[in-house]
Image (cartoon, rainbow, N blue to C red):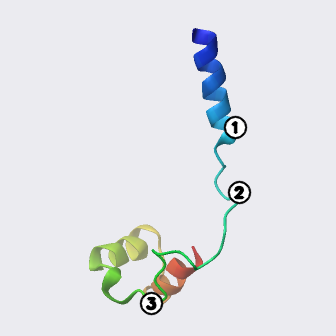
């Protein structure tokens, strides 16, 4: 039984796409917002500016890039 679980675990691990692989860049998804508007909270902006070191003028552009 342990062998079967190990085999299943390795199958799941190899079937799971790795970060950055098979990523679609389509904007045709229900959650994509072409403009952030008020979706970016002050706390979110502060996090990106202080923790990530992104200049205030570049925060929105950075979000769209990622």
The residue tagged 2 is: 21
The structure residue drawn at horizontal position 58% and vertical position 10%, both measured from the top left corner, is 2
Looking at the rendering, in which quadrant would you find the N terminus? Answer: top right
The residue tagged 1 is: 14
Looking at the rendering, in which quadrant would you find the C terminus? Answer: bottom right
**Label 3, label 1: how many angstroms apart (C-alpha)?**
36 Å
Quarter of the image for residue 65 reads bottom right
Tell me: residue 22, above or below residue 36: above
Q: Residue furthest top?
A: 1
The structure residue drawn at horizontal position 71% and vertical position 57%, both measured from the top left corner, is 21
* Secondary structure under the numbered disc 1 in the rendered image: helix
* Secondary structure under the numbered disc 2 in the rendered image: loop
Q: Going from the N terminus, do you reach mark 3 or mark 1 first?
A: 1
**Label 2, label 1: how many angstroms apart (C-alpha)?**
13 Å
Check contact, mark 3 vs mark 1: CB within 8 A.
no
Label 1 neighbour load within 10 Å: few <14, some 14-19, many 20+: few
The residue tagged 3 is: 35
Label 3 neighbour load within 10 Å: few <14, some 14-19, many 20+: few
Check contact, mark 2 vs mark 1: CB within 8 A.
no
* Secondary structure under the numbered disc 3 in the rendered image: loop
């Amino acid at each position: 039984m342990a062998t079967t679980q190990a085999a299943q675990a390795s199958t799941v691990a190899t079937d799971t796409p790795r970060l950055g692989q098979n990523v679609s860049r389509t904007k045709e998804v229900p959650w994509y917002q072409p403009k952030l508007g008020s979706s970016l909270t002050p706390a979110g902006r502060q996090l990106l500016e202080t923790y990530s070191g992104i200049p205030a003028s570049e925060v929105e552009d950075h979000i769209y890039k990622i």
